[in-house]
Amino acid sequence: MRRSAIGCTAVTAVLLLATAACGGREETGGGATTAAGQCQGQQTTGITDTSIKLGGIYPLSGPASAYGDIPKGIKAYFDYVNAEKNGIGGRKVEFVVRDDGYQPPKAVEEARRLVEQEQVFALFQTLGTPSTTATWDYANQRKVPQVFVATGASKWGTDTAHPWTIGWQPNYVSEARVYAQYLKQERPEAKVAVLYQNDDFGKDLFGGFKRAIDGSGVTVVAEQSYEVSDPSVDPQMRNLAESGADVFLNITTPRFGSQALAADAKNTGWNPLHIVNNVAASITVLRPVGFENVQGIVSATYYKDPNDPQWKNDPEMVLYYEKMKQYVPEADPTVPYHTFGWAVASSFHKAMEAAKCPTREGLRDSVRALGGVQVGMLLPGVTMTTGADDGFPIESMQLMEFKGERWELFGDVIDTRKEFGPLTD
Amino acid sequence: MVGFLQQVVEGLGAGAIYASLALALVLIYQFTGIVNFAQGELAMFSAYIAWQFTAAGLPFWPALVLTLAVSFAGGMLIERVVIRPVEGAPELTVVIVTVGLFIFVNAAAGWIWSFLIKDFPNPFPGGALEAGGLSVGYSTLGVMAVVAVVMGLLYLLFQRTKVGLGMRAVAANPTSARLVGIRVGWTLALGWGLAATVGAVSGVLVAPLLFLEPNMMGGVLIYAFAAATLGGFDSPGGAVVGGLVVGVAETLAGAYVDVIGSDLKVGVPLIIILCILLLRPQGLFGRAAVERA
């Protein structure tokens, strides 16, 4: 017994030493290289004249592994660009994907491995607010671009201490503003009942909604929160129904989204206009509730739905279906997560092409100086714009209503920056 | 007043769900003397098996029967393979093993069926019974009825059958039980099998209400523990009463106590567990453990 304990201690000590040694070598030597000429002194780690190496961290396992489909869409896009377009400006893209299981500590570990061992040029997407929050200090200390993170938290754009990190998709506050704008126009006297998840995500969206309706006739008459550990939101839905509100804003993640939709459908005495947030608007959330029970609900989106027949002959969608089949034949192209991956990868392509210097600094500055960049997979009218005082690439969304077995877009694209001004704090 | 009664009804509906899982917890405790943290996940896994059968085209009721059979066999198998090696080890060891089982089963379900929500058929009609301004969903009534039946069957098993007697003997004193000729190993395996079956009933009942995904039972398990502690870990009737009390207490506290609201609602079962352990450790309906000096 004693001997084995000593043995264990010895092994642990050796491992610790080895880890420390590795860390030390990376710190002092490393593969850090810098550019010459007009980009002098800027970092060129992970990028050469013929290659660029990117690292992504996604939950390929664990509770959020549905998002693990995103890198497949990205891979299809980069494989296509590498094989048929000679890469991004002559540089072939190598995209390394790591699994964090949606656990922040693992995300930090993987970020270190990507940056220090794989020597990636940039972190292209970390997924989820918790994992991105856990890694952004590290990325910024190391001065590694962490671009187009896959989360809608508003802090990626409002924060000023992390210039190397930037989001991509519309943030939750923008989304809330879209719903607020819709209600102000269509139901100026709306009485709104709100169900929200009691965490950063729910509070971000709900807080944005409250600020957006401030000073209008739209009022919140009831609010209920739930914890992700709650078995069911039925009791909350009961309390909300008693408020007699004529609009219900459903700020939930998938399982609770289904529960709230089912509770609303079951309660024949309360029939509000049901607005469900984008996070829970996927077909996989609606189908278990029964399509007949979710007719007429409203949500918002910003990229093209691969199931929507109106894009059937859209050149970008045709290309997407063709290349998905060619390069990732095992993946189902009708899954919107793949489309999301394709859209964000082509956005990266445009941002990288626009960079003045092929350096980490060049990419950092490029993603913060996007001027109405068009991306084929985004909805017509939705473009990427950033600037010195604007850290949010996409801030426009379009409303959609569920009809039959799919979402149908309606109304115009709502540019929330134009309607509500820049988002601060 | 109607609003208040409606809240009580909602609470009873939630309580019936907790009670259904608490019954499985009580059963396995009765048989084997251990608290099985993986019970909720096993129930979830059974619900997936039922889903798989219905997805393959079987009607609901035959699928349920098959699921119960598979769960029974699976429970016995787990006892043989996972629990038997640590039989007789300190309680903490067994608890850790069941926690490990919890994590494993959860991950396995995600790996096999993904974390996307599954479309689970509801055996009960969708509407609600309206009476005096109150509305009670038929599925809630259905859950309550099934829970009552399972409770009755368990009571008969414990009190009126030789198997029940044998298993009470094994739980009370394995060594003596073995000496009087009870096959302790089989009894323990039987306990796991039956608990898995009762858990399967629970999983299948709640899946259409909570929506089936691998984390469906995580929250329910906490409340089921509160229910079993409140009612007494050795009393099926107590578990059901405990479940209903916990459900109503939680719902009313969330609705009427402003300080608690929906934010702290999840704290209610923990407060119940703590108070019961302090004031009446054996639970409302349980028998105090007596040890010979």
Image: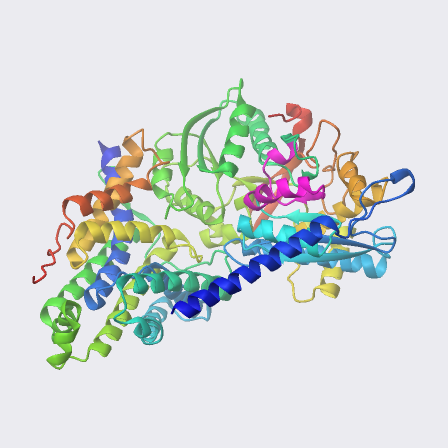
| Outermost bottom residue | B181
**Side of B242 where A51 appears, left or right:** right
In this view, A251 is above or below A63: above
Which residue lies at the image location 63% right of the left edge and 27% below the top edge?
A: A423
- What x and y, as percent, mark residue A66? 56, 55
Please give the range of residues in magenta. A129-157
In the image, is residue B204 above or below residue A373? below
Residue A404 appears in the rendering: no
Residue at point 51% right, 29% down? A207
Percent position (x, y) of residue B147? 23, 58
Q: Quadrant of residue B109?
A: bottom left
Asked whether B116 or A237 is in front, the reply is B116
Residue at screen point 22% across, 63% down? B29
Answer whether residue B106 is magenta in the image.
no
Q: Residue furthest top?
A: A215
On the image, the x and y values in percent for residue B271 come to 26, 41
Q: Of all residues shown, which one is farthest toward the left? A: B293
Residue drawn where x is 21% and y is 45% of the image = B245
Q: What percent of the width, then of the height, locates residue B152?
A: 16, 62
Closest to the observer, A150 or B170: B170
